Structure formats: C-alpha cells, structure tokens
Image: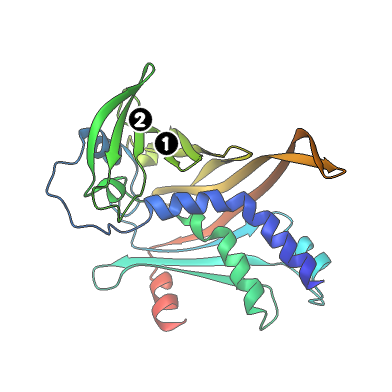
Amino acid sequence: MKKKFINYCLLVLITFMIMSRHENVFGQDPQVAKSGAKIADEVTLHDVKMFDPKANGLRDLVFELRMDNLTEILKSNYPFGKLTEVYYKIFWFNDEANGENWQIDIYGLPNGYEEIKADLRKLVMHKMEFIIPKKLTSLVDGLVYEPVSIGQKKYLKFIDPTMSKITSDLLLAFDGSGKLTEYLTKNNERQLKMTFDYISMPTFNGKFAVKRHSVLNEGPKNSSTVTHSLEYGPFGTFHMPVKITIQTQNKFTVVNVKNGKAEKEKTQTQDLSSVLRLSKYEINTGKGKNKILHGK
C-alpha cells in the first residue's frame, strides 16, 4: 500500500517539478556580488509593471489550500483509517527583523506520517511564488547582458561570468509595454522555455499579475509541458489567487526491442491535471507571524 502511495506522489510530482525549477530560478536570493552594472531597462520596467503585494502593504498572511481529490486518493492508497478531509494551511510574514518566512502545515492526517506530510508539502511549496511574486531583478542582478535576435524576435541575452548563479545563457523577451513574455535557456541537450500571460484588476492599481504560465521542458527523447491557469478573487484591498488549474502533458519516445533488436520508435503521451483551491485568506492579522515564531 505504501508503495502505491509513493508511486502516486511521484506521478503528481511530475506535474509540479518543472515549476519547482521556476521557483529555484526566480525565487533564489542573489548569490553573486552586485556588479554595479546597470540593470536592463526592460527588467526594471517589468518589475514596475507587476503587482507586488508587499509593496502594497501585505505584511502577514494566512490561508487554506485544497487539492481536488487529494483526500480520496490518500484514503484509497494508504491505511489511515477514518480520514475526513486533508488540506493545507499556509502561514507567511515579512518584516525587517526576520525577513520573509513561510510555513506549510498539513491538516486532517493522523499524528506521525512525517514522510507523507513532507511529500505533500513538496507538491505546493513552489506554488507560493504565485501568491507572493519574486522580482525578476533577483534573477539577473550581477549578470551581464546584450540584445540579440533569433529570427524576427528580439531578446536580452544574459550571461553569468562567474558561472555561480546560472550555468547557461538566459534569453528573456518582453512585450511592447515591458512585461516579460518568454524565458528561454538551454542546458546540454535540453531546452527550458517559459511563456507568460497577464491580467490586471482594479485592486492591482493598474498593475499586472500572472494569469497563465506555461513551461516547456524539451529533450531529444521526451518533453513535458506544464501550464498553470490562475483565477483571482477579492480579499479586502487585495486580489489573491483562488484557483490554480495545472495541466501537464508528458511526451516520451518508446523503443520496442524484439529478438535483441530495436524496432521502430513510438511516441507516447501522458496527460495529467490538478486543481488547487485557495480560500479563507486572513490578511495582516499577525497570525502568520505568531504561528511561525511562536507556534500559536
């Protein structure tokens, strides 16, 4: 039974793992010294265009997150006994003394089962950037860049002279208003391409948030496309994500072997989907900080 659950977790992790790459890129703290060089105007303009909850007064946050069918899948694959509902409760705060802090708790599971709870946290931990977006400048600070063209499309090409932050060239494309539309990088035989669509709402004060985010991770024998579609709802003076629909398509090449000889290659496709529902936002109540620092 445990093996079946672990296999399920691995399957779902396929849906989420590419976004974890995105988080590792955009969410990381700068690891190289600031070069003193001017940040590209396009990068600065993009950050100005994006809605920043922290800049608009968000200091403390608590909310609940539910994944469709999670409770039923757990009940059918692991002998927990009676299981009513399994969901996440997420705490966040940011202040000058402590910096930015997250805590993801699992509710509805019996005491123990720490390995299972750790797997469940991994499924959502990299989605938090949709809640509190990171600055694009955190990615390119310290990198050198130049404008390049590929066909009719114009990019900014970023290079890390120290090879300590990124190990391959990074290409970024922007639309006419300054928003990032494409992120492209290659590593050995693989290519990672991200595309972005945006939405604006009255509470964004004329700024934008991600509406649709797609990631293509492509290699010579397989590829995976993960698309996140976001819906927002009003909570006080903020619009926060209330639904994240995740569609994944995996393509891989299978070679049949007969009598020790490889036969014709065949491409197989696997489609996966998941829905995250976010609710019960509590904004600037101090509960996030109290939970993270004091456990209550």
- On the question of residue 131 being in view, the answer is no
Disc assigned to residue 65: none
Whole-percent x, y for residue 119 in the image: 62, 67
Structural crowding at the residue carrying mark 2, measured as other residues with C-alpha within 10 Å and reported as few (<14), some (14–19) or many (≥20): many
Structural crowding at the residue carrying mark 1, measured as other residues with C-alpha within 10 Å and reported as few (<14), some (14–19) or many (≥20): some
Q: Residue at x 69, y 75 (%)?
A: 109
Q: Which residue is mark 2?
A: 173
Q: Amino acid at mark 1?
A: Leu
Whole-percent x, y for residue 81 in the image: 82, 77
Q: Residue at x 74, y 56 (%)?
A: 69
Eyeballing the image, is 95 above or below 193?
A: below
Residue that lies at the very extreme toward the top in this rendered image: 152
Residue that lies at the very extreme toward the front in this rendered image: 260
Contact, CB < 8 Å: mark 1 with mark 2? Answer: yes
Quadrant for residue 40, please give it.
top left
Quadrant for residue 205, please give it.
top left
Eyeballing the image, is 109 above or below 127?
A: below
Q: Which residue is mark 1?
A: 184
How is the model colour-coded? rainbow
